[in-house]
Image (cartoon, helix red, strand yellow):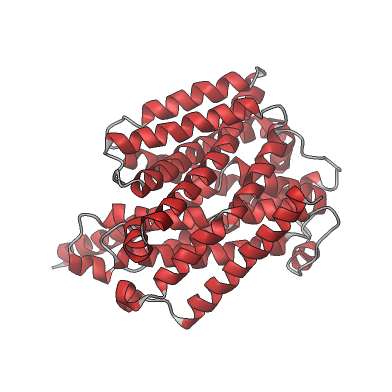
Amino acid sequence: MYKTRICYMKSNWKAWLQSLIPGIITAAVVFGPSKVTIASKMGAQYNSSLLWVLVIAIFFMAIYTNISSRIGLATENSILTTIRSKWGRAVSGIIGFGVFLVCTAFQAGNAVGVGIAIGEFTHTAYRPWMIIISIAAIALLFARRFYTILSRVMIGIVILMLFSFLVTCFLSHPAAGDVLNGLIPTMPKGAETLVIAFVASCFSIVGAFYQSYLVQQRTARLTAEKRAAMKDRSLTGMIILGIMSAAVMLCAAAVLHPRNIQVQSATDMGKALEPLFGLSASRLFLMGLFGSSFSALVGNSVLGGTVFSDALGWGNSMDQPVVKVCIAVIIALGAALAWVFGSMPLEMIVFAQGITILIVPVIGLALLLISCDSKIMGERKNTLFYTISAIAGLVLLLVLAAINIKNLFFK
């Protein structure tokens, strides 16, 4: 009896941990080089005054990730199949192509992050490394048990980065008053571009959209009864994402801002870890940057390739060769864009994340409408809280898109 109870507890504990994986993978995909770059710039230039932006972005990311997760649990078909049956092929095609464009833009930043990490670590040109690592990522697609390898790598990287920045944040002793003041919304002069870029990369509708695919991937072999009993666990991943982003910003605010260090390279960002790692901080940071960049490079391409293939009606399983080809195309395009626009890599990362916000409101609207449809969602339909919060998040995306259009075309 006792042994049976222990086995039951172990089984439940394992099932609970496995249920966290989709949310953690989403956090790992979103927490790429763009997040580290932008959060470091925000802390270095504006101290803790933009911490409120992070709180708002994470809140809305959690809302939409939860919505997407519930859609994945409520439906047996993929979310794009649901969109196609509800609004037609044109709408699903636009969303699929939009996700493809967004992921390609993000992919360029991921490729640059990988190249910079290895280039600065080895004191060599970073561009060739972008191509070498992209080729390695394509080769990884054809490894057996690809999803298992991907999830374990991402979880390991998330844990390492979380530990490093949390300990450094503790040792750097950020001023409590500055942290509290940072939760009060203010907009320092010249911060608009960074704010838009941060919200675009942190409040990632595309990442939230893919959560439904990840959930269905994890529950594909479950019985209908077990699937119906499952609860959404995406909040854990979003909390981890928020903690890591806040730790990066606060480290930069406490270490870089007082020294007036303007973040111009990955080595500059690495100086934020000096309270923990001393003179080895920059080199260790470059290792962490490589890990986060590579996990984001692979995860982001899988996201974009899977959704794009599904939009074309070619399937959405990572075991299908056509899906792997679509994934490989995004990796290759990202590397090509990074090669062409790599003369100002950090600025390109910020710009790429800002431009994506022009596309995502359509995806957010689709998620909102499906999650409010009782015929599709059943008992997993939005509560009033989630509906109001999702509408507010959609309004935020539209406002930021309008600001971005103004800055890009009417300045």
Work out which residue is located at the far left of the displayed protein and give it: 1
366 or 72, nearer to the observer: 366
The quarter in which the N terminus is drawn is bottom left
Is residue 4 at all visible to an observer of this figure?
yes
Quadrant hosting residue 219:
bottom left
Residue 274 in picture, x, y percent from top left: 72, 39
Is residue 173 at all visible to an observer of this figure?
no
Q: Residue at position x 81%, y 40% from top?
A: 262
Residue 195 in picture, x, y percent from top left: 72, 55
Q: Is residue 359 left or right of residue 309?
A: right
Q: Is residue 106 left or right of residue 304?
A: right
Q: Residue at position x 47%, y 32% from top?
A: 331
Q: Is residue 271 left or right of residue 324?
A: right
Residue 323 in picture, x, y percent from top left: 33, 39
Work out which residue is located at the far bottom of the displayed protein and give it: 384
Q: Is residue 140 left or right of residue 27?
A: left
Residue 147 in picture, x, y percent from top left: 33, 42
177 or 345, nearer to the observer: 345
Q: Residue at position x 58%, y 19% from top?
A: 128
- Tell how many labels: 0
Name above or below for residue 108 compared with residue 86: above
Name above or below for residue 185 compared with residue 252: below
Name above or below for residue 371 compared with residue 363: below
Name above or below for residue 322 compared with residue 187: above
